[in-house]
Amino acid sequence: MKDIRLFVRLLIPCELPLHSPFPLPSLAMSLRRLSHVVVTLLAILSGVRETAGQSASSYTDPITGMSFQALQDSSTGFVFGLALPETIGTDFIGQMIYPSTDGAGWGGAMTSTLLLVYWANGDEVMTSFRETSSYASPSVYDGNVTLSTIPDGTYVNDTHVSLTFLCGGCITGDSLSFSSTDTSAVLGWGYSTSSLSDITDSSTALVFHSAGYGEFGFSISGAQTSEYDTWAALAESSSEPSSTASASGTATSTSTTTAPTATTTGNITYDAIIVGSGPAGIIVAERMAEAGDNVLLIERGVASLYSCGGERVESWNDTITVFDLPANGYELPSLDDTSFYCTDTASQAGCILGGSGMVNALMWVPPTAVDFENFPAGWNWDNVSASADNLYARNPGTTLPSADGQYYDTAVWDIASAFLANNSWTEVDAIASPSDKTSVYSRPPWNIQGAQRAGPVMTYLPLAQAMDNFELMLSTTVTRVVRNGSTITGVEIETDGAREIININDGGKVVLTAGAMSTPRILFNSGIGPSDQIAIVQSGSTSITLPEESEWIDLPVGEGIMDHVIFAVTVDSATGFTAYDYSSINSASANSTDTELYNAGSGILARSGQRLTFWTNIETNRSTRYIQGTVAPKSNNTITWKIYLTHGLTSNGTLGITSDGSTTLIKSPWLTTDDDKATITSFMETFIGYMDNSSELSITSLTGDNITAESLIEDYTTGAHWAASCKMGESNDGSSVVDTDTRVWGTDNLFIADASIHPDLPVGNIQTVVMIVAEKAAEKIIAYTAPSNSTTSSVSTDTETFSATASYSGSAGATSVESLPATQTSVDSSSAAFTLVGSPTSSAAGSSSVGLTTTGTSTSTAASSVITDANICWNNYNSCIAAGQPNPDWDGCTATKDDCLTKASYGRRSRTHRKRRLTRF
């Protein structure tokens, strides 16, 4: 069976990170009120084959006799038709047809973030409404839309799959769809040869459009017809083939809570467990192993680079994998198997050794002081510049990756650099001059060494693996950290459905580096975060063992998450050029001249897809906001300018969790503030002005509409440069998740060292800053002495020998007694109070010396009362810590410092006990 998957969409640009073993064709379609630029969002990762911009025309379906304004794509045979009433309301009639073999396939129609998907399940046409706005598989849409099929135009036969339908409530006039008052619109489409995992489930994961994509404009008036009401009357309500979506389009869950999976406990322990092998995790793990810790690094994915055991080698060079090859910077989503993308995150993320650093487009932008201006004290540029130097010593980046010293495929560079120079921009080297970020452009800076993708997998991991005290565990997911109150004792892992607890040694540490999309999930699963998110885990289907609710730690996990926002503008060039064809580089038919050059360390395959990068900044009333851009060929004679709003933006969102354990965006983080909108509008006005004065470059509209700054920013997409989901702060005041040692508030030995803790976004792509912060975090974590894991937070009354000194308030009252030095065993007090020392001698209140048994089991009523009261106080104190209250002031706690000090001040049971207890006070 030939495997075809075709779909149209706009705000799912080029990356649906899911795959399936089932060979089933597929199709989807997007409808959207947009400017000419919207569909270029599909081309952000522009390696897949693209069809040039097209226009819809009149089309009459020979089976139903219905007439549509339709796209008929000659390269794929795909047809999409749209019919509207003379007075447009909220409904439309649509038809989608694509060729298939043996009746297989899926497809859909999408109004921006609203996507209608359909595919064949035997002789039945399956449908599902979806919604998306980022690089992730679209989730089932829960809005009030309906689908009614028109039977004569809905069928599966030996050659085609067709869906003709009435889409009720689908013209919303907001960000979901085009408006009833629009005169034109642009639609984008994508085509994939990957497969659906379960054709019987209407909520099954979708996949990336790996085989091609394109766009077309259509006239709203051309779609209007007097026959609309007659045709709409033919529609019949669809019977939903799956309970995952109701007829109204509202999602209903099919998941159920299953019995907890039996969990075993491993017999090997470690000084440090690092969770996640992304750009941060490998650095932290290597530095901690270098410092002498016995380190375990856990990664949920498989090996990536050839040097670390990666197996996805190129057919023309079996010593490099697809991840090694720099030219795959934009091509990885087009591979048949994209299982290296996470399937349970709210946006694109890499689930492979090296994390997202293995699946990005290799941009390497060294930061400057401004990138750390909003970090807390101890984390400004002066504090982290040495960490940057340490990183650059191993991983410097380059603007000239070809070993022969030549630049290749320079047509777009020549055109774009001349364009910017004519508008008084200056050329710099982005690596040599990282502080120059005002009206400058550069050859692209890349994370490439020796003509291969660089990063910690290449530059840190081999050093770690050479040490006996380092272990790497692949294909293993960490579900949660295991904790006893504030003390982390280990992690729970899952491999092939089996769960196991791996413990850390006494005084050990756990460091989360799973990324800004996944570290929050581990915290939620560990009873750390907003209570409403932990409650979703509690009632969900993932069988997570949570701490008792009284031990949940309330921290703003997921709140304030940030991301660069990208606007893509398609520009036509008067100078003709041929865009390089990347479609065959991962096959045996790759250009032999290029592969031979690459095997010598040179040529176009030794670089990523960008041809030029640029930066500037704009002063606003409140701050300075930065703009970054990349320029790359889109197709012959056509260039994509990607424009990012970066450092200084103030928009942020909220990341949460679903009942099945996936992370999800509860609140969108893009363009939510007026200042951000004003900044990007200002830049677009300048950009349009440049174009108006250029004879070389021009922005054109597929619909013929005028190009305005407002139309250029109407549609945007994620930069997938996520940060700030677990922000760092100087005090536990409800605005941060970790302290300046990167330790999670309310815990003794849990740390985070990935992009989650960044309080802000950098000027450029984020991976360089992530690595610098990881270097600094490793330094902080190594220097931090974690308390002993064997201690408890309450006062012991067991038979283990200990000495204690306590003051007891008698009838005459007493003042508080401050914490005793470790060597002090008694304290003087007034006649209105007494102290307990040694063996019991008296139980009379007010005596100057009353004994306390050295075994903790006292015959003294007064001594027992002191122990009881002190234990109550300690328990209250623990509740304070669990609630994230500051130490030692205990503001807002049930137990105050004076409360506990009046009741008891204990000495030591052991050296580690003494240290822990005395620091409590």
Image (cartoon, rainbow, N blue to C red):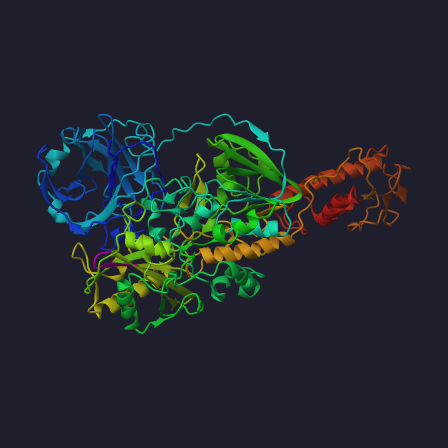
Of residues 603 and 661, the one nearer the viewer is 603
Task: Report if residue 280 lies within the magenta region.
Answer: no
Percent of width and height locating residue 316:
34, 47
Which residue is located at x 52 percent, y 27 percent?
260
Taking the image as shown, residue 849 lies to the left or right of residue 186, namely: right
Of residues 47 and 858, the one nearer the viewer is 47
In this view of the protein, can residue 753 be seen by the observer?
no
Percent of width and height locating residue 756:
49, 50
Q: Is residue 796 above or below residue 332?
A: above
Q: Is residue 588 above or below residue 700?
A: above
Dominant secondary structure (helix, strand or loop) of the stretch shown in magenta? strand
Total numbered labels: 0
Taking the image as shown, residue 33 lies to the left or right of residue 862, namely: left
Taking the image as shown, residue 234 lies to the left or right of residue 471, namely: left
Boundaries of the magenta span? 635-641
Check the image and name the residue furthest to the right. 841
Task: Report if residue 640 lies within the magenta region.
Answer: yes
Percent of width and height locating residue 762:
45, 60
Percent of width and height locating residue 725:
48, 49
Taking the image as shown, residue 498 lies to the left or right of residue 781, namely: left
In this view of the protein, can residue 523 be seen by the observer?
yes
